[in-house]
Image (tube, rainbow, N blue to C red):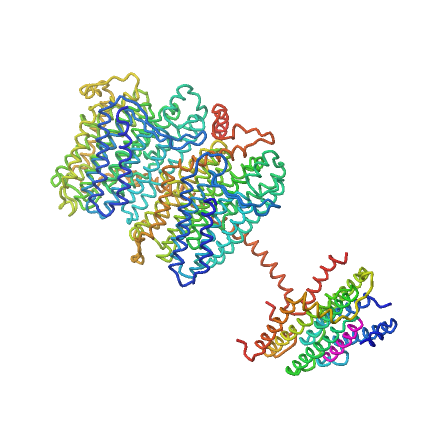
Amino acid sequence: MSILTYIAGWPLLAALLLVLVPRNYRVIIRAIAVLATLISAVLAVKMFAQFVPGANGFQFEQQIPWVESLGISYHVGVDGLNVGLILMGAIVAFAAALCSWEIQTREKEFYILLLVMTGGILGAFASLDVFFFYFLHELALVPTFIMIGVWGRGEKKNYATFQITLYLSIGALIALIGLIALYLKSGANTFDIPKIIEHAKANPLSVNAQNFIFPLLLFGFGILVSLWPFHSWAPLGYGVAPSPTAMLHAGVLKKFGLYGLIRIALPLLPQAAQSWAHVIAWLCVGNILYVGWVAMRQKDLNLLIGNSSVAHMGFIFLGIASLNLIGVTGAILIMVAHGFLAALTFALSGYIYKQTGTLQISELGGLCRKLPFIGTALLMAAMAGCGLPGFANFFGEATVFFGAWTTFPAVTVIALWGALVIGGIYMTRAIRNILHGPLPEKWASLADATNAWRKLPYALLLASLLLFGFVPKLLTEKINPDARKIVALATVENKTGVVIATRSSGRESAPNLLAENQRRLASVATK
Amino acid sequence: MEQINNLVSGGAAEDVLFYVFAALTLLCAILVVANPFSRSPVTSAMFLVLTIISMSGLFLLLQAFFLAAVQILVYAGAVMVLFLFVIMLLDLKEEQRRKIKLFGLIAGLVSVGIVVSIFVKSLASIKPAAAGPTLEGETYALGKLLYTQYTLPFEIVSVLLLVAMVGVILLSKKKLE
Amino acid sequence: MNVGLHHYLFVSFMLFSLGLLGVILRRNLLVIYMSLELMLNSANLALVSFSRFNNKLDGQVLVFFIITVAAAEVAVGLALIVALYRKRQSAHVEDLTSMKL
Amino acid sequence: MKYEILPWLILFLPLLSVAVITLFTLRSKTVSSLISIGAVVAGFVMTLLFINANGFQFSGETSTNWLSIGGLQIDFGLKLDALSLMMLLVVTGVGGLIHIYSFGYMHEDRSMARFFAFMSLFTFSMLGIVLANNFLMMFIFWELVGVSSYLLIGFWFEKPSAGDAAKKAFITNRLGDFGFLFGILMVWGLLGSLSFSTLQSTLAANPALLGASATLAGLLIFCGAMGKSAQFPLHVWLPDAMEGPTPVSALIHAATMVAAGVYMLCRTLFLFNAESLHVISYIGGFTALLAALMAIQQNDIKRIIAYSTLSQLGYMVMTVGLNGPTPAMFHLTTHAFFKALLFLAAGSVIIGMHHKQDIWHMGNLRKKMPVTFLTFTIGTLALCGVPPFSGFYSKDAILAQTLAQKSYLLFCVGVFVAALTTFYTFRLFFVVFFGKEKSDHAKHAHESPLVMTLPLIALAVFSFAGGFIGITNNYGSQFTMDHETLSMAQQAMEPFKNLFPMLCGLGAVAVGFALAFSLYKNAATDPLPAKLGGLATAMKNKFYFDEFYEATFIRAHDFLAAVAEWIDRWILEGAIIGAIRGGTDLSGRALRLAQTGNLQTYAILFVLGVVLLLYFVLGK
């Protein structure tokens, strides 16, 4: 059995176990959930440590045939693209389980859903079979709706649940249509991703088929990732979601769409990807700039964080759109980094909500005095959110900028403005209004997280952000070789199999590039 | 038994009997559904008894003696008594002459008409086994079949009856809790 | 022999259609129920005649079971009608429209 | 390179101290502050050791690969040459003194441990800028310096004004960083490398490589310096930054961080072409003039010094723009000494005055605070450029450079600013230390403890002697090919080689002093507003830059944000989602009509369904 099966399996098994535990044994329920996610996290760390960068093919692979007539099999494995995501997902899940102490009603059901979600998403990331890839994602997605609908907070709960369900179901459905079309058109008669890719190398899909399937995958997955203009579900949903759900969804589950694009759409639909890259790049501007502006106007902390998380998705899309090694590597880096970051911010806002009962920014203020630990963590999270070096996000964003600069200089400049200036404005405004300033009388009795268990999730997430911020090589050296393969497949010229030199991967041939870039830059400069 | 057998398998007599019973069955059935003289459920019930009895005559013609007996025993005997008991228990008045909705009537007639037409159409495609009927009234064989090949369903049906009994008692208790 | 399978089936179909008509047009629950019995019986007739003309006894076994189940069903159904009548004081379908939202 | 490990230790010790303080010793003020002070003092000692072993005229790099993705190579490397070693000395030396001073200054504050953690973080970041050997690493520490300055300005976060000032500083710096990173991307895109030495050799081999975008790239890189060194038009944050504790103002907003922009320009001077340098020099000159004018009508002791910092930074940037990195760095170094001194002395005054900062509440403090008075005097003389104080030498070098480059307009600006500088500095000097006590606080002022006065004395020594202890020699060896090493006496006589600029400078000082003396010798209120009228009001209100930015930049962003939110709420959420929702709702209502609740309707529908089914199965 592969270690991956255990990583995804333990939470699911624990969920089944929880069904049998009577609901009034609260401590046991909580202990089982925390323990199961802890085991997953420890196994994921072990897997991450044992991963050999640049090894050929997949590692920790396991394949069990299931429906052979359709070519469906249980197939898991990791390479550089998903190893970081699985690690991040497992750690975030553990943190989310720890943060779930804030749930006071129907705890049993909540923990069961949480564990199902965890197992589903970790399994989806590990799957190398389109069927399980999609199925396990849905397994994780459905609990989200229930959790927001049942344990959500605030008056807009029903509306938000309605919207998130509508959007994500439609998105998943469109992606499903795309995946089925891909299965039918590829002619490989298998759901196994590596096999389809191998098959497509010899018999590439026709450009027409690609141009039909790619938009389906792009917008289907895009809706799941809150690509502009399909983003309005995200801030709303996260605004009302209980914080463990928001942590898992915004941190981990949301990355599924992006992962799907990189894993499936880029290598199989290269020509379509090349012709759609411009569209993606300009949609990013919507995410980064427009949603950044929207974030500036928010009066509720969670809505602000939600919008900023949507804005961050723009950088990832930009990295994917750049279709070169640097950009794609950067995109995956941000995916991992943003997972930790989103989980951290939602956990913190959950803590503040639990203490104050409100997230209206105007109601808060001066909290750093009463909540030094939480306040400091929130400040660090906000700083990580506006791309401060030292946190993992910085290298992701910087790499994406470098990658995108060679293909979309104008968009990159706009993205820079969004990252540095607009991000800075809304984050510092939020800090100023929440943490700084005089403390209102009514918050004099707030309590900081003093207990080590309470501090653990925040400390863990912060430590992960800092670790990958200081030593990004841990991730990049794993991502690099496999991203190179994906990029090589994605930049194949029409049917000839020749790699386009200028887009291949940064600057293997510097002189060519220099001339190319000069031409581009001159055009930018004149603008 | 032998005599009846001889009587009915006489060819022409058998045909006549079929037409008699068939006509009786359908006529009574019409009167169950739409009696121009009475709308009382009791009348309907009584005509239903007649329908069932004449149908058991058809069963006889089909050499299903055991079923003909069961039909009369269970339906005419038990089921119809139950109906009458309920009618009396509820003390139902005659169905008031409410205004029959024209639309409902037409829709009902049309849909039934379509069903009939489909049935009739499908009759044409039915072809009986070439050999013709050779099976004679084999109550003995039926019993054997019932207690060998169909033992399990038989037992299950008996459980079903028990369950129905329990259910009926529960349902007809005064207070449903 | 002039009378064959077709004749019996015709009777059976007519019986079925009459039952259907009753179900659709009559308003008294009990009469509707009786019409249902008619439809059930028409099926019995068809099965017995198939059994006869196909030289297989299994059809009769099936009818036997149908009669048994029908007896159980009538008992339960009537009990339900009684319970309903107690609650609503009516056995008229047009009075029983709680299925409407 | 001997002792290669030392620069690494110098860089990372402060980071280690941040980690130790935040993780373990946050409860103990004394231990935390000692750790922090220890880290920076040890850094100073190690710098001396390193210089002792390798000498100043030395150039080396030590680096390790941080990240490499295809064509993107990011190293974590240290560049060691005269420029960075001198800066190391300034940062750890002046920084060390300020750390020690803070131990006294912050003693009463309950968050002292946090303060020292931030200070160490700042030191780490600043050292990173100084040592960085490539653009991205410099940018990283650039940002870190920005955030530590943000944290320190907002240290007393409960004061709304401190929070606002921190926010403003951060965002303004971010604007500069935007240009900086933009420029870095452009340079990388064109030259394919980030490392300073590779870039320099590439450009030297083929100067036309930057092509048409050379000017743009240069100006974008300069944007970074504009933000950090608070040059016009991004100068607005620096005066507000005085909301932070005084040692912070001394360390960050006088001696080191704001100098980072100038340092960066000197480090990357090879990138700039003539046009961009031209623009830079004029921006510097304009900033110098603007800030000096604003300083005249300020009343907060720290703000006056802050504007003078702005003005002096303008000098330095102007000089870099005139292709004179040596005088610029010379002035940067001497300025670090005397401006840190002035701030710390001002801090001492503020402590003595129980945190009153308005100069019109002070007066006659020379008797009550003799050490502070003496050191402040030395700082003032150095700032004004009175011989033989250090400022005299560096300012003279700057004026000489403007003449050497035949930039007469900037020369006039320089002289005029020198006069203004003397005027407002002595205004401050007279009002604070002479005349009558203007409040009760001033009557009860007292001298500061030894831990604060000792650093003052040490800085005073350097402020006096900075002009002839070999600073120019070291910088000159880096920037000038045929640089000759001068002895101390030669250095002391250097300004006299070129009499015209020196005499102009001295004349400006004399005029400024005469004016200040006549107006403020015994003034109880400011006589100037009456004489200048509207101009004084404009000066006092910083020429309305804040209001202007508020009305344009901030308003524009808020307006766009409002538009975006409106679209989000009413078009995306309202119209589109509403349409989907409404459509679904409507069709649901329509279908509900079929739900009559009548059993027989259902029966008919059921029959029709069966009929359809039969039709397809049998009927065809």
Q: Name the quadrant of the C terminus of chain D.
A: bottom right
Residue drawn at 51 percent across, 56 percent down: A162
Q: Name the quadrant of the N terminus of chain D.
A: top left
- Res. B102 visible in picture: no
Along the line of sight, the residue nearer the viewer: D404 or A476: A476
- How far across and down, in percent of the image, does residue A368 sit? 31, 50
Residue B77 sits above or below residue A261 on the image: below
> Is residue A409 found inside the magenta-colored segment of the image?
no
Quadrant housing residue D335? top left
Task: Give the side of residue A171 with respect to residue B145, left or right.
Answer: left
Q: What predominant SS class does the magenta segment belong to?
A: helix
Residue drawn at 50 percent across, 36 percent down: A57
* Chain part drawn in magenta: B44-61
The furthest residue to the left: D367
Residue D507 sits above or below residue D577 on the image: above
Quadrant housing residue A198? top right
- How far across and down, in percent of the image, does residue D203 sit? 40, 21
Along the line of sight, the residue nearer the viewer: A281 or C65: C65
Along the line of sight, the residue nearer the viewer: B173 or A357: B173
> Is residue B54 found inside the magenta-colored segment of the image?
yes
Task: Give the side of residue D500 with respect to residue D277, left or right.
Answer: left
- How far across and down, in percent of the image, does residue B104 sit? 72, 69
Quadrant housing residue D395? top left
Count all numbered tags in the image, as a single digit. 0
- Res. B100 visible in picture: yes
Residue A9 sits above or below residue A58 on the image: below
